[in-house]
Amino acid sequence: MYKNFFGLREAAFNMNPDPRFLFATRHSEEVLACLSYGIQNLKGFMLLTGEVGTGKTTLLNKLLEWLRDAHVATAFVFNSCLNPMQFLDFMMADFGINCESSEKSRILLRLNQWLLERYRAGQTAVLIVDEAQNLSPQVLEEIRLLTNLETSSEKLLQIVLSGQPELEEKLKQPQLRQLRQRITLRCKTYPLTLEETFGYIAERIRIAGGNNQPIFSSEAVEAIFRYAQGIPRVINLLCEHALISAYVDQQKPVLVSTIKPVAREFELHEIEPTPPSSTAIVGGEDLRLMEALQNLAILMDRLRRSD
């Protein structure tokens, strides 16, 4: 509706976690570096957490895109409302592993055999579980048991568990302490800063076909940042509805006077965002930022050569 008016080829602020629109910040690069490092070095079990709407699923989709381009076997479990058998069935199906038996013991034997075959061929497999804060303790225990699939020196299955901060609290429960102790790398997503919000909006407009003409005034972007508290999902929501309102009023660029009614409509309040911490990586091995970024660069170079 508004795309032609603003000179865009496509909608710039869809809510879908499209990896094409991933905006690189120091924290997002750290997350990708941390996860790629853990996968390449067969660390076994990695944890990604962050507030709602801070881009976890978009980062996971980018990671999946890289892994699939490199022909790494992946399974992406995005439905967290599963019982243990449903979880295993979903995982096996997404890996593309056939198992003639529906017995749990046979399924696990088939999975172990498949992982060993890949290991002997110098390949690995990655299981990514999103929205993990909603997983039942029974399914989380099933995931812990999957970490026992290993050789004497290496983990056969690389697992990335992603969820909201409630996941960290859930993992502190006494019955899940064995799972918590197996986490080798931890990383987090954070809200954007004001400067990053300017870059985020500009980058999405560029990818959507913008012609370098300003679509949002500087005051409008500052208001979006305040109302959204730096949360990318809320930024998208405000920008999308502001573009619609501005189109109706035939107004270019979008002014701060357009942002305020949209924010009121969604009951947002002007609250300063909490500054992110200085690092997004913590873990038992004290992974340094430079080492992680170097591993990310190595992974990206390998993917480019594989094209």
Image (cartoon, rainbow, N blue to C red):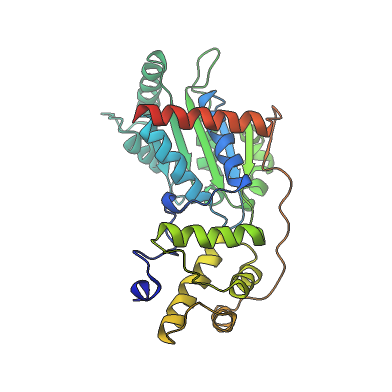
Quadrant in the rendering for residue 111: top left
| Residue drawn where x is 59% and y is 29% of the image | 294
Question: Which residue is at the front of the view, 163 or 68?
Answer: 68
Task: Work out which residue is located at the far bottom of the displayed protein and give it.
Answer: 249
| Residue drawn where x is 47% and y is 50% of the image | 80
Q: 64 left or right of 294? A: left
**Residue 182 seen in this snapshot:** no
| Residue drawn where x is 68% and y is 44% of the image | 173
The percent position of residue 98, horizontal first and vertical second, equals: 27, 30
> In this figure, what is the number of numbered marks?
0
| Residue drawn where x is 55% and y is 35% of the image | 35
Q: 83 left or right of 290? A: left
Which corner quadrant holds the N terminus? Answer: bottom left
Which corner quadrant holds the C terminus? Answer: top left
Quadrant in the rendering for residue 86: top left
Q: 113 left or right of 49? A: left
The percent position of residue 235, horizontal first and vertical second, equals: 55, 66
The percent position of residue 236, horizontal first and vertical second, equals: 50, 66
User: As displayed, is residue 194 above or below residue 187?
Assistant: below
**Residue 91 seen in this snapshot:** yes
User: As displayed, is residue 121 above or below residue 284?
Assistant: above
The percent position of residue 94, horizontal first and vertical second, equals: 34, 38
User: As displayed, is residue 193 above or below residue 47?
Assistant: below
Question: Which residue is at the front of the view, 232 or 144?
Answer: 232
